[in-house]
Image (cartoon, rainbow, N blue to C red):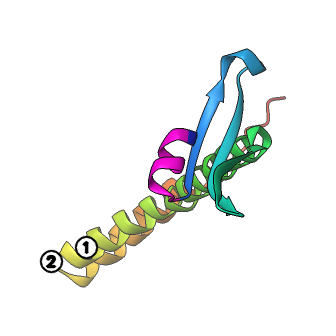
């Protein structure tokens, strides 16, 4: 990476995971330097292991919330579909009542 920065003069950025560093992740940035007619390059390493972990947590959270928000909508969608496709008002009322009944908890039974 340093060699390509020296040759091209263009800065570079790369993420990598180092096995020698217990699997920690780093972002490596290189840039060329020129002072007093001499060329060189500098490399900076940023440890980003925790940042990558937090990115994974955020993605998992968004996926879970998205799933939970879609789940309760399915019964409402089904009921609307039944109402729209029912041929008469009586059938629509029956479809609505049937959906309402199926969404209720069964009554508790008391035994003596």
Give the left or right position of residue 73, taking residue 47 as reference: left
Label 1 – label 2 distance at C-alpha: 7 Å
Magenta stretch encompasses residue 5: yes
Question: Label for residue 111?
Answer: none
Is residue 23 positioned above or below 48 on the image? above
x%, y% of residue 65? Answer: 62, 57
Q: Which residue is drawn at 28% across and 70% down?
A: 81
Q: Assign a secondary structure to mark 2.
A: loop
Residue wearing tag 2: 87
x%, y% of residue 106? Answer: 62, 46
Q: Which residue is drawn at 68% across and 52% down?
A: 58
x%, y% of residue 97? Answer: 43, 68
Q: Is the magenta stretch mostly helix, strand or loop?
A: helix
Residue wearing tag 1: 91
Give the left or right position of residue 100, taking residue 16 as reference: left
Q: Residue at x 79, y 41 (%)?
A: 50
> 54 and 70: which one is in front?
54
Q: Residue at x 50, y 65 (%)?
A: 100
> 59 and 32: which one is in front?
32
Look at the numbered discs 1 and 2 and tell me whether their residues touch, using CB distance below 8 Å. yes
Is residue 108 positioned above or below 84 on the image? above
- The answer to whether residue 1 is seen in the rendering is no
Q: Residue furthest right?
A: 112
Neighbor class of circle 2 (other Cα within 10 Å; few <14, some 14-19, many 20+) is few
Q: In which quarter of the image is the C terminus?
A: top right
Q: Quadrant of residue 1?
A: top right
x%, y% of residue 53? Answer: 72, 40
Q: Assign a secondary structure to mark 1.
A: helix
Instruction: State the extent of the magenta-drawn residues as a range.
Output: 3-10
Is residue 98 positioned above or below 85 on the image? above
């Amino acid at each position: 990476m340093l060699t390509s920065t020296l040759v091209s003069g263009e800065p570079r950025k790369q993420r990598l995971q180092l096995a020698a560093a217990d699997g920690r992740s780093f972002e490596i940035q290189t840039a060329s330097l020129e002072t007093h007619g001499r060329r060189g390059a500098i490399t900076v390493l940023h440890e980003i292991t925790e940042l990558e972990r937090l990115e994974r947590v955020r993605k998992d959270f968004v996926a879970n919330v998205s799933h939970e928000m879609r789940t309760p909508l399915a019964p409402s969608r089904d009921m609307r579909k039944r109402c729209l496709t029912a041929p008469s008002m009586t059938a629509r009322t029956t479809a609505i009542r049937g959906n309402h009944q199926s969404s209720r908890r069964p009554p508790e039974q008391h035994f003596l």
